[in-house]
Each structure stands twice: as structure tokens, then as C-alpha cells.
Image: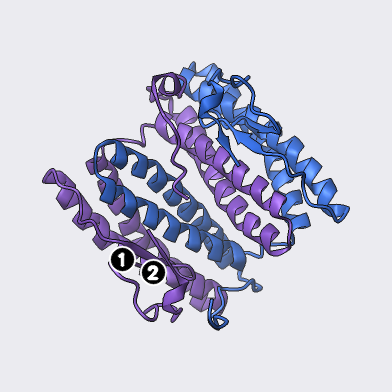
Amino acid sequence: MTDTIATGEAFEKRLPKPEELNPMTKESLAAAFAGESQAAEKYLVWAEQAEAEDYPNVGRLFRAISFAETRHARNHLRVMGGINSTAENLQAAFEGESFEVKEMYPAYEEIAKLQGNRQAGRSISYALKAEADHMGQYTEAREAVLAGKDIDDQPVNVCLVCGHTVIGDAPDKCPYCAAGKEMYKTF
Amino acid sequence: MTEPFKNTPPAPESKGEMTAANVAAALAGESQASQKYLAFADVADAEGYPNAARLFRAVAFAESTHARNHLSVLGQIGSTEENLKAAWSGETFEIDEMYAAYNAVAKLQENKSAQTTFRYAEAAERDHQFIYDTAHKQVKGGQDFGPESVWVCPVCGHTVIGTVPDYCVQCGTTKEYFKEF
């Protein structure tokens, strides 16, 4: 999950760097970033499906190619100037979550209700609730980093079903989707 | 897991067009958030904020669960045979249409870094197109993909089955940086 890799000068010098971009090229990069990001996520899900169907090598292949798409996504993001200092990254992360919580998901939830799409409604409501967790967590982290400190050394637990995110121990039951404690992944 | 989990993830359903479009847009949003947070985690580690890095990785994972739920509602988690076919189609679109067009514009506008990142991606998507085609044929014949290692260049995404090359043919990165799967 962490995709931690060796880095060094020989590695860094080959990475595409941020540059002054023309608007059309910037649009292309943004669209390519969206495409690579979705491919990376799809391949991870399809890896799990392959493993469930007892194709472990196909599962491994999907994970490898997902990693390759992650590297493309990151290169596109870097060229667009989207990777900055941690303080700036936390601010950008907060703004993204804030948009999803205040604008995107409430609108989508209303439309899913109007159209009677219950499963879509659930998927949207899970995300909406978890993004509200993230807003608070990113705000606290940004304040710490602006004061020159890291956040506290505590585990972060994430519900595998709905993405509920809690700093510290996992609850006995997910407050959003009622999954049990054993359904949490600890970071 | 002790007992089967009763509250299953959101399932595919027949949807209104606006809702389908919204769930697709939400999948795009969650996927991008997840990738951004993974990149931000590496920066936090490099700046000496390991706990902030852990938070970014945890939240990236949370966004992945949302992306998976949205993908499920969209009916895009098929059988492995169908998934490999869909993966091949996606790579083919990127090679034949998307990166071809984006590259042309970046060249016209002389944006050099953009050309580099598009070129890296397009070359790797060609690897993926071929590999997915091979895997699709094997799964269709009831077989798993081969047991060989899959090596990925972390700079450009060049993907090789079997033995790692001494250096990347696309970007020149040496073999010690390649990630093995």
C-alpha cells in the first residue's frame, strides 16, 4: 500500500519536473492524471477479484500495473505543480475534502434520492461521512505542521467497507456502516 | 474473519442517468484524491513528518474504499476475464487516442516536461496492452497468468515480465530502482 521505493539522485534527475504550462497542455495533463488515477484504483479492485477467483498471478499482475499507473499519475501531478511542501499539501487536501463535503456529495446524494437509487445513495453517503472525518484530521495536521511539529504518534484506523477514518483505536462497531472492529485496517 | 459481515458493500443497480454520471465523477474524484495523498505521504516522510505521512496513507486507503464502492455501484467489477478485457480496452484507448492527442498538443505548445510525462506513460501503456492481451487469453483458456516476476520502473512505469533489465529502455533508470511484484 505504501509503495515505498528507493530514491536517490540518479532516480530524481529522470523525473519530469514542473514547468510553465500552456492552458491546453495543462488540461491534457489534468485529464491524464484523472485517467491514470482511476486505472490504478480499478486494477487494485480487479486484483482482489482475480485472487478471489483463484488467479493469484493475474492478481499480482494487476497490482504491478496499478503501481505503474500510480507512477504516471504522480509524474503528471508533479508537472502540473501539484506536489508541494507538506503544509501546502495539507491545505490542498483540506480544500479537496471540504469541496466534497459541502458541495459535491450533498448534491449527488440529493439526486440519488430523487432518482430512487439506493445503492448509489449508500456509496455516496459512506464517502460523505468519511470525508468529514478527513477534513478535521487534515485541519489538525496542518496546524501542527505550520507550528513545525508532526502530529501525534498514534495509529490511524480505516473501515474497509465505508472508509470511516479514526485516529487511535478502532471502535467495536463502525458508526457509519456497522462493520465490526475486525473490518478495520490499521496504519 | 470471525463471522460473515452482513452489511455488504453497495451493489450494482439500474440507475438514473444523472446518478450514473455523478457516481462516475465521484469515482474520478476519489481516485485522484487517493493518488495525491500517496504522493503527499512521500513528501511528508522526506520532510520528517512520519505521522502526517501515515495519516495521508490511511486517508488514501479510505478514498480507495470509496472508489471501490462507486466502481461496484457502476457495475464495473466483472469476472477476471471481463476485467482483463476492460483493462486492455482502457490501455488501447490511452495509446490510440488519449496520449496520441495530448502528445501532439504538448509538442505544438513546446511544453517539454509534459511531453516527457506523456511519452513515459504512452510507452508503458503499450507494455500493459500486450501483457493484458496475453493474460486475457490465458484466463479465457482457464489458466492463470505465468508465475514470472513483474518488474516496474518507478520513474516511467515501464513494465517487464521475467528478468529485470540492467537499465530501463524508456528512461534509463538502473535496475536497482525497479520494483518487483
Instruction: Tell me where residue A168 appears, x and y as whole percent.
Output: 28, 67
Give the mark nearer the N terminus: 2 vs 1. Answer: 1
Please tell me the colour of chain B: blue
Quadrant of image for the N terminus of chain B: bottom right
User: In screen coordinates, is A123 left or right of A158?
Assistant: right
* Quadrant of res B90: top right
Front one among B174 and A21: B174
Front one among B94 and A154: A154
Three-letter code for the amino acid on which mark 2 is drawn: His
Instruction: Tell me where residue B110 appears, x and y as whole percent.
Output: 49, 16
* Chain containing the residue with disc 2: A
Q: Are marks 2 and 1 on the same chain?
A: yes
Residue where numbered disc 2 is placed: A164
Q: Is residue B111 something one can see in this rendering?
A: no
Residue A133: numbered disc:
1
Q: How busy is the neighbourhood of tag 1: few (under 14 within 10 Å), some, or many (20 plus)?
A: some
The residue lying at 41 percent from left, 25 percent from top is: A21
Q: Using the image, determine if residue B176 lies above or below residue A41.
A: above
Quadrant of image for the C terminus of chain B: top right
